[in-house]
Amino acid sequence: MTTVTLPDQTLAAMNEALVNNYQDERRGYIGASGIGTACERRLWNQFHWIDNERMSSKSIKAIEDGHHSEGVMINRLRMVNGVELQTEDSDGRQFSFKDGHLGGSLDGIILGTAHEPDDPHIWEHKCINEKKFNALVKLVVNDEPTALFNWDEQYYAQAQVYMLYFKFRWHYLTACMPGSRDEISCITAFNAEAAGFYKERAIRVINSARPPPRISENAAWFQCKMCPFTDNCHGNKLPLTNCRTCVHSTSNMDGTWTCELFSTKITDDVQRSGCGKHLYNPGLVPGKQTDAGSDWVEYKMKDGTLIRNENAHITTIPAAGG
């Protein structure tokens, strides 16, 4: 006999509130934590704020698990005689770096590990599900030097970029499952070639005026299905209106943005709202350009609809004879 569990309305409302109250971070820079993503177009879309990344309640809870378990691990590591774990610099701020539009913040710096007691390591902590945890255990046992790359390239890229900018030779990852009852570590050495590759990827994305190619032209591809920008990339969804989706904006290597229309630098606040002269970057419009003027562009969308983009607005053009 099958038992049916009815949903609890209170918990359902709680999960809905979690989603509605979630604040999209919308970073102003490309973070080291995301530089290893497989799709450069996704990285470009994040950098250009084409849409809000709506999170599920499950994903939000996973983030909360991560924050909680990080605190637990900090306290436990600090109990070990001879181990020094620093999570803040001399000014009481999180260790971080900023290089133009590329940046990142460390969980900490650890000294006194059994691996290289006198050599400091970048420390990062991850809270992961059981399947991912067991996969890491197997890889570490088999070949620890290559384990992080083979396990999760995004974490590997983050580690390499951190070591590059902080000039460390070692990265010490700790990982646990929710509840922090089991843990494992993974030590990774600095690889200058790999670090350079990921840094160049960021520079390429920053300098690209148009979206890079998709990782797949098939919307059903598993990475596309999981991407928060799939409706923009494969569907008919138009991007948000802000300076970073505007054809007149240019990212500069010093970490600033310039509006070419008004020949001025754009502050962060202005970037987020845009102005009345906003005109979409054509690479973000899921349609074919059919006509244009000095301050307007017309497109034929995938479904045949004709639209005009002018002065921060989209209007539908009636069909001939309609």
Image (cartoon, rainbow, N blue to C red):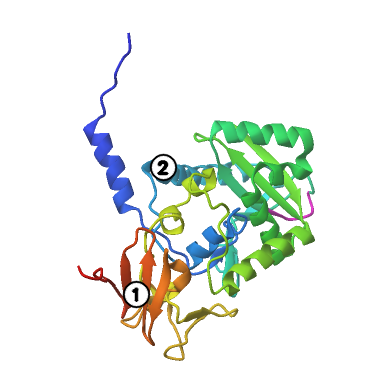
Q: Residue at x 70, y 47 (%)?
A: 149
The question of residue 121 being in magenta is answered with yes
Q: Percent x, y for residue 14?
A: 28, 41
Q: Percent x, y for residue 63?
A: 46, 46
Work out whether residue 231 or residue 189 is closer to the camera in this orientation and state it.
Answer: 231
Above or below — where is 280 with respect to 124?
A: below
Quarter of the image with the N terminus in it: top left
The amino acid at mark 2 is Lys
> What secondary structure is the stretch in magenta mostly built from?
loop
Label 2 SS: helix
Q: Residue at x 39, y 87 (%)?
A: 294
The amino acid at mark 1 is Ser
Q: Which residue has dot 1 on it?
A: 273
Work out whether residue 22 or residue 116 is closer to the camera in this orientation and state it.
Answer: 22
Q: Which residues are magenta?
A: 117-122
Q: For residue 61, which numbered disc appears in the image?
A: 2
Q: Residue at x 26, y 28 (%)?
A: 7
Label 1 SS: helix
Quarter of the image with the C terminus in it: bottom left
Work out whether residue 187 or residue 101 is closer to the camera in this orientation and state it.
Answer: 101
Q: Which of the 4 image quadrants contains residue 80?
A: top right
CA neighbours of label 2 inside 10 A, class few (<14), some (14 to 19), many (20+): some
Q: Residue furthest front?
A: 321
Marks 2 and 1, Cα distance to the nearest angstrom? 30 Å
